[in-house]
Image: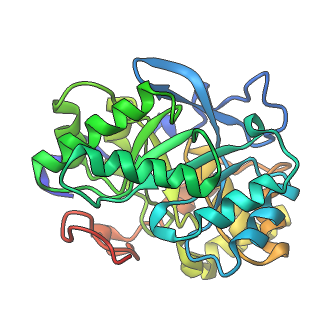
Amino acid sequence: MHPGDTLHSSDTLRPDDTLHPDDARHPDDAQHPDGVLALRNGTRHGDVTVPRLGFGVSGSRDTRAAVTEALARGYRSIDTAAVYDNETEVGAALAGSGLARAEVFVTTKVWNVGRDRGDALRSAQESLDRLGLDHVDLLLVHWPNDDLEPCLRTWEAMEQLLADGLTRAVGVSNFRPSHLRRLRGLGGTVPALNQVELHPHHQQRELRDVHAALGIATGAWSPLGRGAVLDEPVLHAIAQRHGVTPARVVLRWHLQQGTVAVPKSDDPARIAANRDLTGFTLDEGERRAIAALDVPGGAGRIGPVPDRVDRIAA
């Protein structure tokens, strides 16, 4: 964070570290035992809901098999991206699942490929073609661009895709407070969600404060910190107390602070275990203990810093 980017933050639990009203289970979504979160959709709010636990496929070794297993285990939100180079496999798993289109929430991401609006429009259509879908539920700009003009043109394309019904909601990924404020300053549609690196070692409190102020939902990629956080003794102690795995403790922590988490795995046993987050709740003391795992100064980050590179490696 830069000095001008932060709102107010504290190392103590904030009131919104408990479940928000929008985190309650939607009456029509009994299939989502972990609840759903209401998203913005253009100027409306609440008419698009995303399951608060999804399944990610970045770096998947066998995407079709992993997604097939995830859907069989009850996941109903799949998160992919053009740059993952596996949208075709995701589409094949969806087509072979026997599930109706409306039963699965699909997210993909437009890469920061171009310098004009048409590049984003073409990229989105190519993603739809690979997925075999006529629309996605959430379309994200995958990476910020510090140049104003490309940012403006890409966001205009996102708004057109939303208006044309090719996506039900639009958002961003890896945007820092300065990027969000600049985008908000352009006027128009507020991003529905910002998906960022977020886990116990990198808790992004300041960024989450900005999200709350702007009405943007928080999504977490690498919610388990690529497994690095799971060796923490405090997580093992909490897991033993509840009779669950450390990974399930971390995912439950995400849900209780209102985050949309998308863990990933190729292992069927882990896919199943990560889905089972009911039957236990973290108390205030346990959440305080996890809050204390945050590494100061952003040193717990495992991915690149968005405003230090123009793009991540494809």
Image-quadrant location for residue 312: bottom left
Measuring 32% from the left and 27% from the top, which residue is drawn there?
Answer: 189
Q: Can residue 10 be seen by looking at this rendering?
A: no
Q: Quadrant of the N terminus?
A: bottom left
The percent coordinates of residue 172 (x first, y second) are 38, 47
Left or right: 230 as drawn, with respect to 267: left
Measuring 44% from the left and 35% from the top, which residue is drawn there?
Answer: 192
Compared to 155, does 219 lie above or below? below
Q: How many marks?
A: 0
Residue 284 or residue 174, whichever sits in front? 174
Left or right: 96 as drawn, with respect to 249: right
The percent coordinates of residue 128 (x first, y second) are 55, 49
Measuring 74% from the left and 69% from the top, which residue is drawn there?
Answer: 64
Compared to 63, does 181 lie above or below? above
Residue 129 or residue 19, whichever sits in front? 129
Left or right: 225 as drawn, with respect to 314: right
